[in-house]
Image (spheres, rainbow, N blue to C red):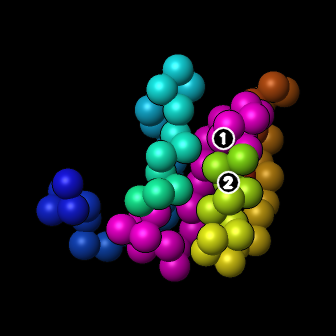
Amino acid sequence: FIALLPNSAALLIIDAPPAVIGRGGFLKYSDLFNTDIPILVDDTNRAEELQLAEDLSVKHNKSRRVVILEEDKSAIVLL
């Protein structure tokens, strides 16, 4: 798995797997990624994704910025 990660990136986007599976497992493995770059957590209008963004913010000492994508859809960018 680690061999599949790119050597560098400007933005980390968390937009999978679907809500049925959940994205909460990302927190456990977030140290495998470069978290010095902005992280976008999509679908934070859902409770589990919002919690993931908050937990990542605390774990990696990042501030949160809410982005409203549509009336009922949001994302959070961690900086």
Q: Which mark is residue 29?
A: none
Is residue 18 visible in the rendered image? The answer is no
Query: What amino acid does circle 1 point to?
Result: Glu
Place of residue 43 in the rendered image (x, y in percent of width and height, measured from the top left): 66, 35
Instruction: Give yes or no for contact between labels 2 and 1 (Cβ–Cβ under 8 Å).
Output: yes
Q: Residue at x 47, y 51 (%)?
A: 26
Q: Residues within 10 Å of mark 2 (few under 14, many from 20)?
A: many
Residue at point 76%, 48% (across, down): 67
Tell me where residue 57 sits by quadrant.
bottom right
| Picture coordinates of residue 16, whole percent (x, y) | 46, 36
The answer to whether any part of residue 21 appears in the image is yes
**Residue density around tag 1, few if under 14, some if 14–19, many if 20 or more, within 10 Å:** many
Q: Amino acid at mark 2?
A: Ala
Residue linked to disc 1: 49
Relative side of 71 to 24, left or right? right
Question: With respect to residue 26, does 71 lie above or below?
Answer: above
Q: Which residue is mark 2?
A: 53
How many numbered tags mark residues here?
A: 2
Residue most toward the left?
A: 3
Q: Is residue 79 above or below residue 22?
A: below
Residue 56 position in % (x across, y down): 63, 62
* Rendering quarter of residue 31: bottom left
Q: Which residues are magenta?
A: 30-50
